[in-house]
């Protein structure tokens, strides 16, 4: 005798960690902000990122 299969799928909340849409969207936004801030720093200081960090 077999068990009947459920007819509906549970509605689970998406986790806020790991590889999911929320994490990927947040990572993309952080990368865009970092890139723009790097350009702003280079524009106002007149130095490249490596020079600004003291690596060049």
Image (tube, rainbow, N blue to C red):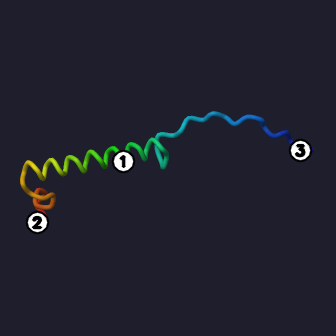
Q: CA distance from mark 2 to mark 3?
A: 71 Å
Secondary structure under badge 1? helix
- Residue 24 at what x, y percent from top left? 43, 47
> CB atoms at circles 2 and 1 under 8 Å apart?
no
- Dot 2 corresponds to which residue? 56
- Pick whichever, 44 or 13, lies toward us: 44
For the residue carrying disc 2, how many other residues have a C-alpha within 10 Å: few (<14), some (14-19), or many (20+)?
A: few
* Residue sitting farthest toward the bottom: 56
Q: Residue at x 56, y 35 (%)?
A: 13
Query: How many numbered circles does the render carry?
Result: 3
In the image: residue 55, left or right of residue 7: left
Q: Examine the image and state in which quarter residue 33 appears.
A: top left
Q: Which mark is residue 13?
A: none
- Residue 30 at what x, y percent from top left? 31, 45
Q: Earlier in the sequence, mark 2 or mark 1?
A: 1
Q: Residue at x 11, y 56 (%)?
A: 52
Q: Which mark is residue 28?
A: 1
- Dot 3 corresponds to which residue? 2
Number of the front mark, 2 or 1: 1
Q: CA distance from mark 2 to mark 1?
A: 28 Å
Instruction: Work out which quarter of the rendered image holds the N terminus and state it.
Output: top right
For the residue carrying disc 1, how many other residues have a C-alpha within 10 Å: few (<14), some (14-19), or many (20+)?
A: few
């Amino acid at each position: 005798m077999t068990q009947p299969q459920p007819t509906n799928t549970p509605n689970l909340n998406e986790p806020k960690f790991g590889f999911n849409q929320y994490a990927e969207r947040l990572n993309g936004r952080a990368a865009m902000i970092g890139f723009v801030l790097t350009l702003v720093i280079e524009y106002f200081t007149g130095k490249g990122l490596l020079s600004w960090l003291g690596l060049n």
